Amino acid sequence: MKQITLAMIGFGNVGRAFVRLIQEKKILLEKDFDLELLVTGIYTAHHGAAVDSAGINLSRALELVENGHRLDPLSSQPAPTNGVDFVYTCSAGVLLENSPVNHHTGQPAISHLQAALNKGMHAITANKGPVVHAYRELSKQAAAVGKRFLFESAVMDGAPIFSLFRGPLPAVELQGFRGILNSCTNLLLERMEGGESFEAAVDFARSIGIAETDPSADVDGWDAAIKVAALSTVLMGIPLKPQQVEREGIRSITPQMLAEARAAGERWKLVCTAKRRGGQLLEARVRPERVGPDSPLYSIGGTSSYVQFETDVLPGLGIVESNPGPQTTAYGLLADLLNAIRGQ
């Protein structure tokens, strides 16, 4: 049986969901993939870090963090105090990078991933920042050392978008896409349709872990814009920063606007769009739009997401992800891990 050692940066909802997932799938991974996964390091911004080449006690790590304690007691040595030093200190073959996204620069996640590749590790992330701000550099660096830089969970959680174009759809040219890529705003608009105030809807989104304490990245369209930039950069071959995406959030949507749309049989959605002709990007935007029952976006409710791709040979290919949670993002990380090991 092959043992794969893992280092984890970030141990929030997604990181902890990943640990639970590999615990649940331990027997399957051994039986079907002949793999044993061993986490040898965990680094966090608020709960310290632990490094142990013999393996971290994952059940104890979960217990400590979920009770507000630090991970330091699980470390066999003084734990590094920054992510880059952690990568170089930790004996692991794969880095799972899940630090909070920086929409404007992609740091410090980019430096973490660069350090991992420098050390000869596979570099896997759910962080959109490095995909947008350093995709070409990190991909080139990974190829130079014979390792993988993978990021399936960066857009639509665990839905196979990037791997779909990397594998089952060879030789297609993506002309554009349109969809709902931010689950938080989709939920907020739906609850406001039902009569809740914006503030009450945000409080509910926070209570189920969909919205941050400061929800401005979702509400003002930054999360959606960086996802548009990621899809354009990777799938359309047109590098794009979120600052270059025409962006309007949902703050301007009033109860009256929602009522008027409902009376007309329509709904407000935060819609992401990108189009190109040849190598030129014609449009990249995020903005609220009214959609009717004839639109596939109309029935996308709650925290679900949807994207429809237009290619030169498939005029309409849609993917729906229904009500995802941290476990679906965690599955995207696991899928990337298995694909990296298998060379896919």
Image (cartoon, rainbow, N blue to C red):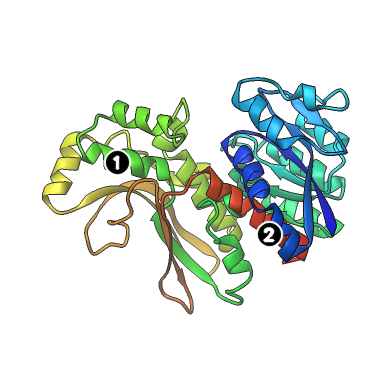
Residue in the image at 69% along x and 35% along y: 59
Relative side of 34 to 191, left or right: right
- Residue 277 visible here: no
Q: Residue 15, located in which quarter of the rendered image? A: top right
**Mark number, residue 28:** 2
What residue is pinned by disc 1?
189
Q: Split into 4 quadrants, where in the image is the C terminus? A: bottom right
Direction bottom: furthest residue = 313
Q: Amino acid at mark 2?
A: Leu
81 and 172: which is toward the camera? 81
> How many residues crowd around disc 1 within 10 Å: few (fewer than 14), some, or many (20 or more)?
many
**Mark number, residue 96:** none
Relative side of 78 to 270, left or right: right
Residue in the image at 15% along x and 41% along y: 259
Q: Secondary structure at mark 1?
A: helix
Relative side of 272 to 164, left or right: left
